[in-house]
Image (cartoon, helix red, strand yellow):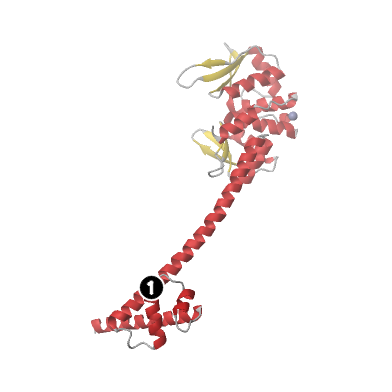
Amino acid sequence: MSFSQDVKKEIASAIPEARHCCTAFLSGITLLLSDISYSPSSGLRILYQSENVAVIRICFTLLRKTIRISADVQMRSGKTPVYRLMLKGKEAEETLTLLKMHPGDRQVNSLLYERSCCRRNLIRGAFLAGGSVSDPQGSYHMEIVCSSMECAENLKEIIGSFNVESRITGRKNSFIVYLKEGDDIVTMLNIMEAPGALMDMENARIYKDMRNTVNRRVNCETANIKKTVSAAVRQVNDIEYIKEKRGFGFLDDALREMAEVRLAHPEAALKELGNFLDPPVGKSGVNHRLRKLSSIADDLRRNQYDQENS
Ligand SMILES: [Zn+2]
């Protein structure tokens, strides 16, 4: 089961007690999922339709708790079954009155979300009907897909009342209200009363932080090792170049010994190299001698170049 499904399952398992909250929950679903139509021949109709049976079942439960309806959930079978709940005539009118909506509306009446308990439930309904959230193991993304800009702005404002800053973007014929910050998504899970998902998200975040810290440390160490290795390779090349062109005879004792010790221990760190010298020399002394050897190699290369090009 995806993280999105976990969140929705958790939301769907808690139907609010108070009538005002049930109404707000239903208005969130209606805002995103319903198809409201009117024609003189068939009158007013509200159709709730989804592949997610839980959403339609909740519509049914919420309607039953707030007004009397006789309509029932139907399944239209096909490759993917679609579940639908159709309200007609008086039932549809009563529903719109309850939700304080007009047939052409794609906005929630502000009277429905004066209380914060109702705003929570409105967001829960909207997320259930059109929301999704990416698995917290990956990058953070939560979104709710709206069919109109006014609906998206309405939702953004309601989410904003909890100090969560969401953004809106267009995609095909939809308007998406989305969040990218892990902290905001955690707050949203709290608002939507999905404590199980919230814990999962927090655990994933802690694990990710730890892994990032470890990765950063490993990256630094790898970079350091690479630096040391490439310096050693350069030193060995320089010393071999000297050996090949002039031999070690012209070097003073200290440099000759250094050159021989480096060739004998091409992978040793500076401190170790110092201990191979007689008498032992500290890290900075070793560094100094190796630099000197490199500069001799450079001189030889330059001479070689001058001879070849004169
Ligand atoms: Zn309420």
Q: Is mark 1 within 8 Å of ligand 1?
A: no
Residue 294 can be seen in this image: no
Judged left or right of residue 52, residue 243 is left
Say what amino acid the circle numbered 1 marks.
Answer: Arg
Dividing the image into four equal quarters, which quarter contains ligand 1? top right
Label 1 residue SS: helix
Place of residue 63 in the rendered image (x, y in percent of width and height, measured from the top left): 67, 19
Place of residue 163 in the rendered image (x, y in percent of width and height, measured from the top left): 69, 43
Q: Residue at the location (71% across, 17% down)? A: 67
Judged left or right of residue 201, residue 138 is left
Q: How many marks?
A: 1
Q: Residue at the location (69% across, 25% down)? A: 15
Quadrant including the N terminus = top right
Task: Give the residue at mark 1.
Answer: 234
Residue 13 can be seen in this image: yes
Q: Residue at the location (28% across, 79% down)? A: 244
**Frontmost residue, 268 versus 212:** 268
**Frontmost residue, 134 versus 256:** 256
As drawn, 176 above or below 35: below
As drawn, 250 above or below 63: below
Q: Residue at the location (70% across, 25% down)? A: 23
